[in-house]
Image: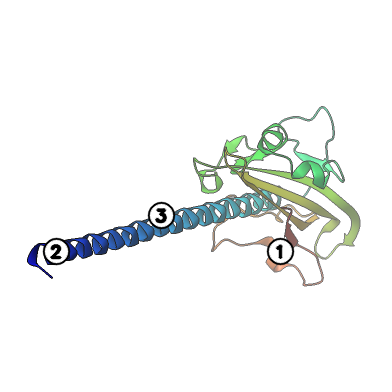
Amino acid sequence: MNKPLQSGAVLLLCLLLLMALSLLGLAAASDSQLQQRVSGNLQHRLDVDFTAQQALAWAEAWLMSLPGESRPVPCSESCSNSQVIRPAGYFSNESLTMNESWWQSHGIPSGFAPDRGMNFPVATAPGNLSAYWLVEQAHLEEWADPENHITELAWYRLTAMAGDSEGSFHVKQGIVARPWGEPSYRNTLPERASAHHFCDVLAPDIPCGRKAWQPLN
């Protein structure tokens, strides 16, 4: 092979090798971008899920912080801003899985204490998300327990939602038991890890606190 042809073959080979490396680099960059998008989407879903759990925990904390001597009567119509506990079946599971606009109309923002009219930043949803909660009194029974000063035991269905402006949202639901009749049966709000929980001083056979939870979507 003469020298010009040999040089041309080498140049062509180099160009082919450079093209292959360029394609490999583009594929790697594309794969990296895809992984970043998948990772970002997964993290966003985890953030929404965590915020929904946080809102559910806040609803429970608020309920358990109410004065223990007098059970709030559920309200279904002409309710004041502080009357947020609804009767059993007031909300159906179908309505609870509606979109964010439904929750904006019916829910209570996470971190808000209706009886105090205050927001607590510790449970407020981050800026890119919104979170709301609802409470229904699911069941009520007389509980004659003079020793523990308990006169009633109520079971509540708590529901919480977290979502974003693009329509992604998670809904969580929990069942909480709440004894009534003794003024000291209340927790601090917001709760602290080292704080006293009144359920801890009751006998194990007295239902108190969260008993079940489930995701609704």
Mark 2: few, some, or many residues within 10 Å (few <14, many ≥20)?
Answer: few
Position of residue 72 relative to residue 187, above or below, is above
Position of residue 24 relative to residue 54, above or below, is below
The three-letter amino acid code for the residue at tag 1 is Cys
Q: Mark 1 — residue?
A: 199
- For residue 86, say whether it is visible: yes
Q: Residue at left 85%, top 34%?
A: 76
Foreground residue among 97 and 192: 97
Q: Mark 2 — residue?
A: 5
Left or right: 58, with 84 as reference point: left
Q: CA distance from mark 2 to mark 1?
A: 90 Å
Kindly identify which numbered label has been placed on residue 8: none
Left or right: 176, with 62 as reference point: right
The three-letter amino acid code for the residue at tag 2 is Leu
Mark 1: few, some, or many residues within 10 Å (few <14, many ≥20)?
Answer: some
Foreground residue among 203 and 59: 59
Quarter holding residue 155:
bottom right
Kindly identify which numbered label has been placed on residue 33: 3
Q: CA distance from mark 3 to mark 1?
A: 50 Å
Q: First in sequence: mark 3 or mark 2?
A: 2
Pinpoint residue 113: horizontal percent, then vertical percent: 63, 41
Pinpoint residue 178: horizontal percent, then vertical percent: 78, 56
Q: Are marks 2 and 1 in contact (CB under 8 Å)?
A: no
Mark 3: few, some, or many residues within 10 Å (few <14, many ≥20)?
Answer: few
